């Protein structure tokens, strides 16, 4: 890792300094750097469950699916926008980074990239594989960063907490969001629901930021194996609706056509 990450203590908001393999603040709150290279900045009193966020099975399924390249057109579009608008030496933040698939693809020789997720299993996997980025376990509602710390932020299918996100975004900084558009995964939904509804795309405005660019990215994916289909299903909020019988049927499918449909919006502070 190129340089020490800069964090604030989640308990008292003082600066954390890395000494040996421990982050420590003036109030003597300590957070150890894990062997995989991440730091857990989610104090137990901030947790709403024992192991919040995605579990190991879900994390492994998402990485397996994403590494097949089905969402590579989305990555290409995000990087195109980043190169068009972003300052390439800036600090970049992936809010709700998961296992780091999108995070690491924004890393360049000049910038500094951070990712935070509440799921420890996801962050552990991210830090182990993408060692040029800084990963931590934390809650998006109380980010361990000083005001105006980031010049570029991305949120891909993660909760958008406007007040906290705009707090850590620098003046004139950019915030890029990806949300499902109307027809996203409609064919997979049709396998599960008798009446598959399109996504509700009513936009909740981010009042503190200005919308400077938006577009929809749509394309058809051919999922070549049943394993890929089941991995994609496990990434969706409707996975729990699928019966074991349906999962068995999906596992037998090959070359399943499924629509990818994304809303991409770029805001500026």
Image (cartoon, grey):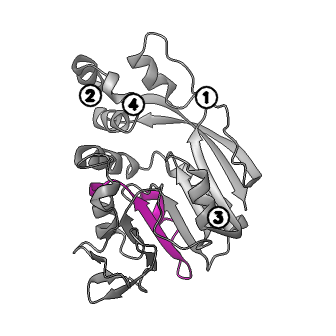
Q: Residue at x 32, y 39 (%)?
A: 231
| Quadrant containing the C terminus in the rendered view | bottom right
Please tell me whether mark 4 sits on a helix, a strand or a loop.
loop
Q: Which of the two marks, 4 or 2, is nearer to us in this view?
A: 2
How far apart are the two marked residues, 1 and 2, measured between alpha carbons?
A: 26 Å
Q: Which residue is mark 3?
A: 82
Please tell me whether mark 1 sits on a helix, a strand or a loop.
loop
How far apart are the two marked residues, 3 and 1, measured between alpha carbons?
A: 24 Å
Q: Earlier in the sequence, mark 3 or mark 1?
A: 3
Q: Is residue 107 above or below residue 213?
A: below
Q: Which residue is mark 4?
A: 255
Please tell me whether mark 3 sits on a helix, a strand or a loop.
helix
Q: Residue at x 58, y 58 (%)?
A: 165
Image location (x, y in percent) of residue 68: 38, 49
Q: Are marks 3 and 1 in contact (CB under 8 Å)?
A: no
Q: Which residues are magenta?
A: 101-121
Q: 5 or 103: which is nearer to us?
A: 5
Q: Which residue is mark 1?
A: 182
Q: Is residue 205 left or right of residue 43?
A: right
Q: Which residue is mark 2?
A: 251
Q: Earlier in the sequence, mark 1 or mark 2?
A: 1
Res 134 seen here: yes
Q: Residues within 10 Å of mark 3 (few under 14, many from 20)?
A: some
């Amino acid at each position: 890792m190129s340089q020490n990450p800069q964090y604030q203590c989640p308990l008292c908001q003082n600066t954390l300094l890395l000494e040996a393999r421990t982050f420590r603040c003036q109030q003597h709150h300590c957070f150890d750097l894990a062997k995989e290279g991440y730091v857990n900045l989610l104090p137990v009193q901030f947790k709403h469950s024992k192991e919040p966020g995605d579990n190991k099975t879900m994390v492994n399924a998402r990485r397996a699916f994403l590494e097949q390249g089905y969402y590579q057109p989305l990555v290409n579009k995000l990087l195109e926008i980043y190169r068009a608008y972003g300052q390439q030496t800036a600090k970049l933040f992936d809010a709700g980074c998961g296992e780091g698939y999108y995070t690491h693809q924004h890393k360049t020789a000049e910038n500094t990239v951070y990712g935070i997720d509440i799921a420890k299993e996801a962050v552990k996997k991210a830090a182990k594989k993408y060692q040029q980025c800084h990963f931590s376990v934390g809650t998006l509602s109380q980010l361990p960063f000083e005001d105006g710390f980031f010049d570029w932020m991305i949120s891909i299918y993660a909760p958008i907490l406007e007040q906290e996100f705009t707090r850590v975004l620098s003046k004139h900084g950019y915030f890029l969001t990806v949300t499902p558009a109307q027809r996203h995964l409609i064919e997979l939904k049709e396998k599960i629901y008798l009446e598959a509804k399109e996504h509700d795309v009513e936009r909740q405005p981010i009042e503190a930021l200005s919308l400077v660019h938006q577009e929809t990215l749509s394309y058809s994916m051919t999922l070549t194996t049943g394993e890929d289909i089941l991995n994609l299903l496990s990434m969706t909020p409707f996975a729990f609706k699928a019966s074991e019988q349906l999962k068995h049927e999906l596992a037998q499918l090959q070359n399943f056509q499924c629509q990818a449909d994304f809303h991409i919006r770029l805001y500026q502070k």
